[in-house]
Amino acid sequence: MINNLVHRIKNRLAREWNEFLVDHFTKHVLSKYWYRDFNYHLDWNNPKDLNEKIQWLILNSDTSEWTRLADKVAVRDYVKEKGLAHMLVPMLGAWKNARDIDFDSLPNKFVLKCNHDSASVKILDKTVGFDKEKLIEDFNNKLRVKFGYLSCEPHYNKIPPMVMAEEFLELDGAGISSTPIDYKIWCFNGEPCFVWVAYNRDNVNGHVEVEQYDLDWNYHHEWGRFTDHYRDGGGKVPCPKSFNEMLEAAKILSKGFPEVRVDFYDVAGKAYFGEMTFTSDCGRMPFFSKDFLAQVGEKVNISLAPLKK
């Protein structure tokens, strides 16, 4: 019992120390994580590739707009402001406490997720049944997590955490995927550049198939760096019917930002907005080749970013 108490105290002190460092010594934490992942010191005065410039933007730019647009609830107003409300997945509600969710008012099949984190999505089906108490406890635990402290992405910490429910969409796997296909469009100041596709997500074993395409939907194996987690899909994903619609929306939503990833889904030829991400994989992406990171890094004009006050 004493050992367990000591262990809990140590964990809490370690967590609070990490939070202090992220809040007050952000550059130190970013530099530490960078060296751990890439085994060289980041030149903060001369960032070059895509990952390096994202780190610079985290440290030096005003990320208040990142906070608003990384918030899966608040970003909906931004999408509406840009005249793209028709691309939003219908939202069924949002709650600060999962215990306040009125499950009786929700349809038989729906989606629950947090607005402030990643990978908290749950597809629920009343006809099959689920453990409501366990679900509530799980989501309330997620709501207590300050996501930005986990990997030094401070803008996430300012998002008011909520659980949100959305309509379930029968997303097309194009006959090749057992999970929805994510079409992730990287944009630089309103100019889409390339598409990273993720599908066949195996959350149990931690695998996902990925592919890289240019805007003419040519597959580029050489842009990728594949691992047991990020597996090469081989270029079999067909161009979605709504691709042009996605590109036009990505141009509108990304205008004014040095870099941002805008995600979409395709449902029977209709494009749906997914989310906006400014620090993809914490800005330490391992799934692109070194040459490709350098190539697209040239497109990131960090002078466009408003500086931190």
Image: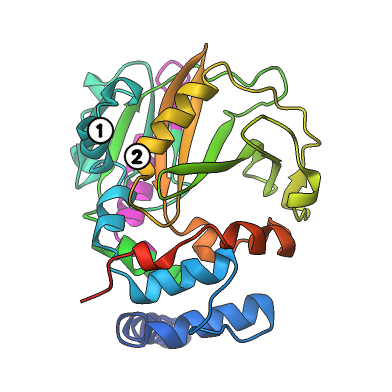
User: Compared with residue 209, is residue 297 higher up or lower down, i.e. above or below?
Assistant: below
Q: Position of residue 38 (x, y in %)?
A: 67, 77
Observer-nearest of 215 and 65: 215
User: Compared with residue 97, is residue 85 higher up or lower down, i.e. above or below?
Assistant: above
Q: Split into 4 quadrants, where in the image is the C terminus?
A: bottom left
N-terminal of the pair, mark 1 or mark 2, is 1
Q: Position of residue 213 (x, y in %)?
A: 68, 37
Residue 101 is at least partly visible in this image: no
- Could you tell whether 34 is left or right of 169 in the image? right
Quadrant in the picture for residue 243: top right
Span of residues in magenta: 123-147
User: For residue 135: magenta?
Assistant: yes
Q: Which residue is at a point 28% across and 72% down the rendered structure image?
A: 307
Determine which residue is flagged by label 2.
253
Q: Whole-Å distance between the Cαs marked 1 and 2? A: 7 Å
Q: Amino acid at mark 1?
A: Lys
